Image (cartoon, rainbow, N blue to C red):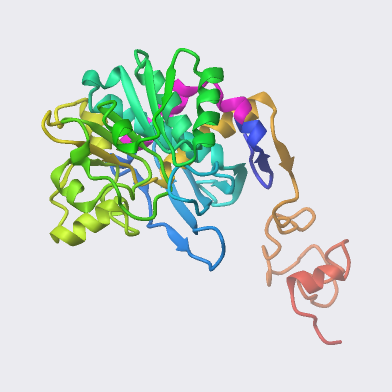
């Protein structure tokens, strides 16, 4: 494990090496993080959001502390790109710093886009599993053919191995085509159908994944089948009226009801948060699935908690160290203060008599007392005039 002054740097390629085909382990790491958060064993301040007047939408810092038997601290720093409303490019600008939970010193620097996409996907899949599948296991509709959408499909396939049919919708047909080709390569048991009409796509299955970059709500859930489960990973797609009419599950109420997302708009409209039904961590802890209503839409709206980034980053860091991956930088941090030769405490015994030596009193720390010479005087005591 990276210790002391060494910082381990892990690239996207390193992370692919340790996270690919490890979906069950990532699900377990995210599940434990949710449970610890529900038990109050985390610290998750509100994200710091920077909105510069440039092409990308925002920069977000998510600091967090994850407790338990192996605590971790750190921050995820992510750029969110603007888009035409759905899907969008892969999250290509994210960095995660893991710090020692004891000293606070940085221990690892990780490329974060893959971690952020997979912890989001794992959380959505855990919600689908915890809330029960019903007929959802047979098919799913995906709106937004980006990186998070694909990872969500991958993790859904793990928790719902009976999943067979995937209906995809995206504003860009070529992006949907590339998405379908990737599914054929990496998830060959799934059958993918592109539906250019969004209303028909939404009606195709009772499990719907929203993974867009929409800036304003557009989905009226009355278009959906009764009892549909919506995994609302992009947080801004559902109209506030639809939120108020739904069964709502979150992973953190304070974080989910912010930043002009659908839940924040619903809170403003209603004046309270009574529309929130359950917390995912509590459901995972209790092992219950009884919150859904067959006549109403159920919406899971994850806030994107920093403790999930830490949980997956810590797992990836540990596996990378075991495999000898990454670049270790030994001089990333400033050097520790030098220790005086032969003495742990340079001030020990100052002012005490020196019976073993004759002659006039000496200034403690003078060149006579230390073979290192006059430079010691400057580091330990002020210079004494002649």
Q: Which quadrant of the figure contains the N terminus?
A: top right
Q: In this view, does 231 lie to the left or right of 134?
A: right
Work out whether 323 lies above or below 342.
above
Residue nearest the observer in this picture, 62 or 260: 260
Give the image quarter of residue 191.
top left
Q: Give the range drawn in magenta.
A: 16-35
**Position in image of residue 132 (x %, y %):** 23, 23
**Position in image of residue 330 (x %, y %):** 74, 45
Give the image quarter of residue 31.
top left
Is residue 231 highlighted in magenta? no
Residue nearest the observer in this picture, 21 or 362: 21
Residue nearest the observer in this picture, 33 or 2: 33
Residue drawn 68% across the image and 69% down it: 352
Q: Is residue 230 left or right of residue 97?
A: left
Residue nearest the observer in this picture, 166 or 354: 166
Give the image quarter of residue 38.
top left
Q: In this view, does 365 lie to the left or right of 51?
A: right
* Residue 278 appears anywhere in the view: no
Is residue 33 highlighted in magenta? yes
Q: Main secondary structure of the magenta part?
A: helix
Residue drawn 71% across the image and 69% down it: 353
**Position in image of residue 68 (x %, y %):** 39, 37
Residue drawn 34% across the image and 47% down it: 235
**Position in image of residue 123 (x %, y %):** 37, 34
């Amino acid at each position: 494990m990276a210790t002391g002054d060494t910082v381990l740097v892990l690239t996207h390629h390193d992370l692919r090496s340790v996270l690919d085909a490890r979906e069950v382990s990532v699900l377990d790491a995210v599940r434990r993080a949710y449970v610890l958060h529900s038990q109050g064993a985390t610290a998750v301040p509100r994200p710091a959001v920077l909105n510069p007047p440039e092409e990308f939408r925002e920069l977000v810092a998510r600091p967090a502390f994850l407790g338990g038997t192996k605590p971790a601290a750190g921050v995820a720093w992510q750029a969110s790109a603007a888009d035409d409303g759905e899907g969008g490019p892969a999250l290509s600008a994210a960095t995660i710093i893991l710090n020692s939970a004891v000293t606070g010193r940085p221990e690892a620097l990780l490329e974060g886009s893959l971690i952020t996409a997979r912890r989001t996907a794992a959380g959505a899949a855990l919600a689908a599993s915890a809330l029960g599948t019903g007929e959802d296991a047979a098919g799913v509709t995906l709106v937004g053919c980006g990186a998070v959408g694909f990872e969500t499909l991958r993790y859904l396939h793990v928790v719902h191995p009976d999943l067979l049919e995937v209906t995809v919708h995206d504003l860009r047909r070529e992006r949907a085509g590339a998405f379908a080709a990737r599914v054929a390569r990496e998830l060959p048991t799934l059958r993918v159908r592109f539906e250019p009409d969004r209303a028909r796509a939404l009606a195709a299955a009772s499990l719907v994944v929203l993974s867009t970059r929409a800036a304003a709500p557009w989905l009226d859930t009355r278009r959906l089948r009764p009892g549909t489960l919506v995994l609302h990973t992009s947080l801004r797609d559902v109209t506030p009226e639809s939120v108020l009419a739904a069964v709502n599950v979150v992973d953190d109420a304070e974080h989910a009801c912010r930043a002009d997302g659908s839940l924040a708009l619903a809170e403003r409209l209603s004046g309270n948060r009574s529309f929130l039904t359950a917390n995912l961590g509590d459901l995972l802890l209790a092992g219950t699935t009884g919150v859904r209503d067959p006549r109403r839409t159920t919406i899971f709206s994850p806030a994107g908690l920093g403790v999930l980034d830490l949980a997956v980053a810590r797992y990836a860091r540990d596996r990378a160290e075991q495999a000898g991956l990454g670049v270790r930088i030994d001089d990333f941090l400033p050097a520790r203060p030098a220790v005086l030769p032969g003495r742990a405490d340079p001030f020990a015994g100052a002012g005490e008599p020196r019976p073993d030596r004759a002659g006039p009193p000496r200034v403690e720390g003078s060149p006579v007392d230390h073979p290192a010479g006059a430079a010691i005087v400057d580091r330990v005591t002020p210079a004494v005039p002649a």
